[in-house]
Amino acid sequence: MIGKAIGAIPFAAGLLFATSALAQVTIHVSPGGNDGNPGTAEKPLKSLVKAQEIVRANNASDDVTVLLADGAYRLTAPLIFRQADGGQNGHSVEWRAAPGANPMITSGMKITGFRPYDEDRHLYVAETPKGLDTRQIWINGTRGESPFVEIPLDDLQFSATGFEVTDPEYAWLGDISRPDRVEAEATGIFTDRYSPVESIDGTRFTMSQPAWDNNTWGYDTASQPLFPEESRFFLRGALEFVGKVGQWHSRWHQWVIDPDEGRLYLRTGQDEDIAELDVVVPTLEVLVSISGTPEAPVERLTFRGLRFSHSSWLGPSRDTGYANQQSGAYLSDPSPLHPDDAWETCGWGCVEFESMRLKWHQIPAAVQVSAARDITFEGNTFSQLGQVALGIGNEPLAHETGIGLATSNIRVARNRFAVIAGGAIMAGGVRTDAHHPSDQALINRDLTIEDNVIQSVSHDYKDNAAILTTYFDGATIAHNDISEAPYDAIATGWGWGYNDEGGNPNYDQNQQGYVHNPRFDTPTTLRDTLVEGNRIHGVKQWYMDGGAIYNLSANPNAVIRRNHIFDINGKIAIYLDEGSKHFTVSENVVETDGVWLNVNTAGKMYDQGISTDNRAMGNWHNSLKTGGRWLPRVGNDARGNNLVADANWPEEALQVIAEAGPRD
C-alpha cells in the first residue's frame, strides 16, 4: 500500500526482499491494474510510467518501493529514468518483484494467426503491423535463425562497390525477389561485420554505403581477412534462403519479416504444430535508459527480481551497417580521407583509417545506465534481447538520452543473462572523453559485476565479449559463471596502448597512428581492475583470437587471480594483448590444449616496452604453451607457475576450482 511501512517483510521471504524492509512508501503495480487507482495492494496501478509519477511525488521525503505483480509490462516507448526518478535527499528508490512474482518488462508482441505458405518447406505466414521491422524473433523462448547461405571466399571477387559470386552454382541468387532485405555477414579472427545489399545484378552485388566502405578497411576486414582459412562469408535474410543449408538445418526455426507488406514468414521444425509455438517479435530498440547528467546524476536506484526481454537494435540494417572493430565497437561515420582502393590496400590498417580510430561507436544496450551513481541490479533476468543486454557508462551515442559515461558505484549482482544477440554487459566508453575526459565528472568509477550467471550470449554479434569493461577507475568482475560464448568471456581495457601515456611505438612507426590523432602525455582513466574467482567454460567457440580472459592497454594495479578456465576448445586462456602493463596473474587454474598465457609484445618490437611490467606466478596449467616474450629483462615474468600436464590438480588448485563461480 502507499503509506508508511508497518513492518518488515519476514526473513523467510528471502534476500531479494530483505532490503525493502525500511521502505516507507510502497507503490503497487499490476498488468490488471488501472492508472486511475491509488496504487495500493487492493487497487494497483497499471503502467510503469504512472508509477514513476508517484515515485517523484514521494522520493524526496521517503524511501520508495515500486512493487510489480506477476505478468508482462509491455512498453510502447523506452522507459526513461532521469535524475528525478532516483532517490532524493539521501532516500532510495527500488523497483522489484512482488514476493513469488516474475514480472517482465518487454516490448514483445505475440504473433498469431499463421497460415500455410509453402508446405514443402514447412513455411507459414502471419500478419504483422506494417512498418514493424526487427532483426530477431523468439520462438518458445529460443532464438529464431535468419536464413542464410554461406559463400566460400574462393568464390568471391571483391570491389570498391561490392562483390561478385563467381561460381555458376550460385546463379539463382540473381532471382532474389527482395535484394534490399539481404545483407552480407563476414567474420574474421575477431570481427563480425554486417553490410546491407543495395541491389543485385545477376551474381554481382552492389552494397549500401557507407557500410561497405567501412567494412572493407581497417583490420581483419570483409575483403582482406587476416586469416582467410579462419574467415567466413554469409548472405542472410532472403525468403529464398529458407531451407538452403541442408537436412540438419530442418530442425531450426527460420524466419523473414517484410515490414512493407506487414508479414512474418516462419519455418517450423519437422513435426511441429505452428499453433503450439509462442512467437514473439520485439517492437523497441531500447527498453530502459537510466541517465541524469554528469552534474545531476540519477542516484540510489535499485532493480531487483525483474525480467528484461524482447528488444532489437536495427543499426546493422541501416545504410551504415555494422562495421565492427572489436567487442561491440564499430565504425559508422564516413571518412573524408577514405581512399578509393581502401578495400584492397587498407586490410591491415593505413594512415587514413587511423584518422577514424577515436570516432568509433558502441552498440546501444537494451538496458542503459549513464550519468548515474549508486545503482544496483540484483536478482534480475536479462533474456531474449537483440543487442548488448546491459550497457553501463558507454558513449553518448549509445544511450537513448544522448548522455554517456559518468557512472559511479554501479553494482550488477546475482543476475542471469541468457539468449542474447550481443554481450551480457558492456561497460565504459571508447572515445577520448572515456580515457582523457574533458570533465572529471565523466570518469566511470567503481563498478562491481559479481555472482552472475551468463550463458548463451553474442548470438548475432559474435565479436562481443560476454563481459566488457573498457576505461574504468576500479572495476571488479568476481565469481561469475560464464559459458556458451563465441568470443571472450571477460575483456578488460581498450585502446591497444594507443591512448596510453606516450603512445604506442608500434602504431607510431608502423601504422602512422599519430598523423591525425593526438599522442596523449598523461595516463588514461583505466586502473585497479580485479578479475577474480570466475568460472569460465564453453567460450571461444568461434574465434581463434582473443582470450577467455583478455586485456588491452595499461591497467595499473590490475589483478587476475583464482579463476577457473576450462573447455575453451584449445584457444588462448589468459591474453594480455597489446599495450597491457602492470598486471599480476596468480593462482588461476587453466585447462586448455592451446596457449594458457599470452602477452602481445608486438613481435620484433618486444623490447620497446609496449607490453611490460606483467607478472604471472602461482598458476596451475596443463598446457606448456605460452605466447609472446615472457622475458624478465623486458618486464614480463612468468616464472613460478605449476605445470600439471595430466590436469590431476593438487589440493590448492582444487580449492580454487571449488570456490570459483557464484557464491551462495
Image (spheres, rainbow, N blue to C red):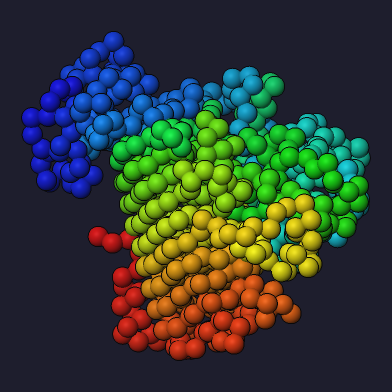
Q: Quadrant of the N terminus?
A: top left
Q: Is 358 on the left or on the right of 647, as rendered?
A: right
Residue 234 position (above or below residue 5): below
Identity of the residue furthest to the left in this view: 6
Q: In which quarter of the image is residue 503?
A: bottom right
Q: Write down the quadrant of residue 47 in the picture.
A: top left
Above or below, comparing residue 507 to residue 123 in the picture: below
Residue 263: image location, x then y, percent: 64, 25
Q: Which of 592 and 581 is in front in this view?
A: 581
Examine the rendering and report whether any part of residue 132 can be seen.
yes
The residue at 39%/30% (across/down) is: 83
Q: Position of residue 481 (x, y in %)?
A: 40, 61
Q: Where is residue 566 in the image (x, y as percent from the top left)?
A: 47, 72
Left or right relative to 158: residue 552: left
Tell me the residue at 30%/78% (across/down).
655
Q: Is residue 338 left or right of residue 147?
A: right
- Quadrant for the C terminus in the image: bottom left
Front residue (pair 181, 291): 291
Residue drawn at the location 78% of the way across and 68% of the way down: 509
x and y, in percent, of residue 194 in the image:
71, 45
